[in-house]
Amino acid sequence: MAIGIKKVARPRRMSMGETLYLLEIVKGLGVTMGHLLRNIVRQENIPTIEYPEVRRVMPPRFRGLHRLMKRPDGSPRCVACFCCSTACPAVCITIVAGESPDPKVEKYPVRFDIDMLRCIFCGLCVEACPCDAIRMDTGWFTPPENTREKLIYTIDMLLEK
Amino acid sequence: MEPALFIVFGAIAVGGAIMVVTRRHPMASALYLILTLFAVAGLFVLRQAHFLAAIQVIVYAGAVVVLFVFVIMLINVPEDKLPVERVTGMRFLGVVVAGLLILESALIVRRSGMAGTPAADSGSVEAVGRALFTDYLLAFELTSVLLLAAVIGAIALAKKKI
Amino acid sequence: MSGLFDLAVAVARIAIMLIFCLTFVVVLTWAERKGAAYMQDRRGPNRAKILGLTLGGIFHPLADAIKFLFKEDFIPDHVHRLFYQMAPMFALAPALMTIAVIPFGPPVTIAGKTIPLQIADLNVGILYVFAMSGLTVYGVILAGWASNSKYPLLGGLRSSAQMISYEVSLGLSIIGVVMVFRSVKLSQIVASQGELLWGIVPQWGVVVQPLGFILFLVALYAEANRTPFDLPEGESEIVAGFHTEYGSFKFSMFMMAEYFHLVVGSLLVATLFFGGWQFPYLASSGFVLPGGFSIGLPGAVVLLLRIGALFAKVVFFAWLFIWVRWTIPRFRYDQVMRLGWKVMLPLSLLNIFATGIALLLVA
């Protein structure tokens, strides 16, 4: 596309009535009053979402809080390979591995803590996981808490989600 | 009732005036000046000069002192850099002259006696307006010419290019 | 005994008027927040609950008041302590004093005594209002200066310049009203507005002084520091202007002063230009319509109708203040000054001149 000259519309000169402002002010008052009355009559049309009671529906690919997947027998699918904690740029995943009682499985996570205050929700842990044990499809973000300790999610909390 | 109120307002006016000249901080002086003007307005009300009292508060307390405060704010001298006032010969002389003035007015009042209580509506808007536009018309118009001259003078001084 | 009765009546009038205005201030803060929210497609305050009821957030002013009362009364280190503490009082006190001369009803007769429903019927009337409202600027200036920091100082400077400029137009714009009704006493002005013009239209100030009304309203908005003239606060430019450094109850005193101005301003507009407590075509015996019809009403009903009329007018103008605030953006500072000195002042002088000529021709 060739470089051309774009005509920018200059603001036209205001007419006599407009320079007096009074009529324009009345028009503006009409606009705001219209909004007010519409919103009083049809409260459900106000776009505000009343957060704790009503929750926004997140899009399907939204990266939210993590959850750990389970095997059919209920044990965690995670094999404590440390791939996720290695991939994590925010270093928020702490894993302590243990010898698994199941002979078919080598290791299992004794501890699997995610510090939600450090997590940047980049999704690299999900990408890194070789056995699809961690997902971020809960569709919700970090809730507010009173202490920082409450936002370090342990393996039990992550499995329950 | 009236003498008691006169003493109260008079004491506030005199006390405030003394504070105006003795305070070190200009803002405090300005606030005491408002107090004094208020007390004087109260004295006017006691002499049935209601219109004068209202105008006193509107013009002096409401506008003139605001300009004083405006200037004090703009210059805003830090408290530790305020000048220390000294008792000089001229100032001492000023106090003496003020004392003489008080003595003089006391003598005049003694000689000719206090004015009687003015009529209830002698200071109303109607009465003052009538007096200004009939008996004192010349003085009134001369004052307005003087004010006009002051306004023009102020503009001429403030604006370099008219 | 009679002296005691008079004293009781005087105290009762002051108490009723003050309580009414302060309650109205509280409700106004709610109306401002809720109205603003609905105008901007939001929901506004709706969380404070008493017994599970929110009632559209009406309890929020109560919650605010409790919060302000229990907050730490913090004084920053760098302020001029005495003036800093005085400023909120200077802001609130003159605003409270202004309501003294506004008549809120016709004189009533109780036990053979005629009691004017007005705290004090001064014979300087409207001048007293200007004397008091002129003093409110000190609260703002003192707050701005005593806070001893940059933005409050700017707010204080803006406010003092603005208030002095608009006080001139404010005073001049009502001279037309005073000329038409031939009195500065507010009770007299209201009484004159009960008459009919040409036997049809109520002789309200707005009918005989339309230009004066517009000028007065604009100057009033500027005096009350309300949008579009809220430059002393100007939260998008100078944080919060003069009350940037204030917190807890001192801040709430500034807030109360602002809303009290709003109430007093509405009362003044209603009194000077919209007939005060006059109900159209309502005489003290009942309705008297221009065609010669009349409907008789008992005295108590007439009194209630008249006080109700003033109340309705005040509610409307207070709402107009809020309505305008959420409609019109803030002026630029040079625009405010240009409007004040180059438009409002000549127009108000013209209004006086035209009123004088009209009065000469009519007489």
Image: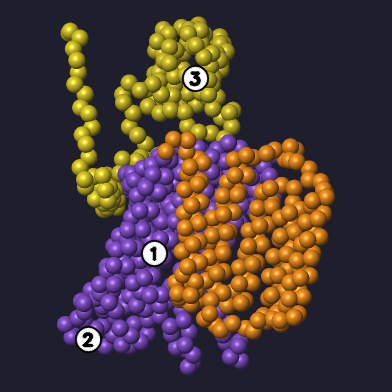
Chain colours: A yellow, B orange, C purple
- How far apart are labels 3 and 1 at the CA level? 66 Å
Instruction: Identify residue for label 1.
Output: C174
Mark 1 closeness class: few <14, some 14–19, many ≥20 residues within 10 Å: many
Q: Chain of mark 1?
A: C
Residue drawn at x 19%, y 85% is: C293
Q: Are marks 1 and 2 in contact (CB under 8 Å)?
A: no
Q: Is residue B112 left or right of residue B126?
A: right
Q: Is residue C65 left or right of residue C352?
A: right
Residue nearest the viewer, comparing C138 with B119: B119
Instruction: Identify residue for label 2.
Output: C294
Mark 3 closeness class: few <14, some 14–19, many ≥20 residues within 10 Å: some
Identify the image quadrant of the N terminus of chain A.
top left
- How far apart are labels 1 and 2 at the CA level? 34 Å
Residue drawn at x 23%, y 74% is: C201
Which amino acid does the dot numbered 2 rest on?
A: Ser
Instruction: Identify residue for label 3.
Output: A119
Q: Chain of mark 2?
A: C
Q: Which mark is residue B130?
A: none
Which amino acid does the dot numbered 3 rest on?
A: Cys
Which amino acid does the dot numbered 1 rest on?
A: Ile
Picture quadrant of residue C190: bottom left
Q: Are marks 1 and 2 on the same chain?
A: yes
Residue drawn at x 21%, y 77% is: C198
Q: Chain of mark 3?
A: A
Whether residue A161 is visible: yes
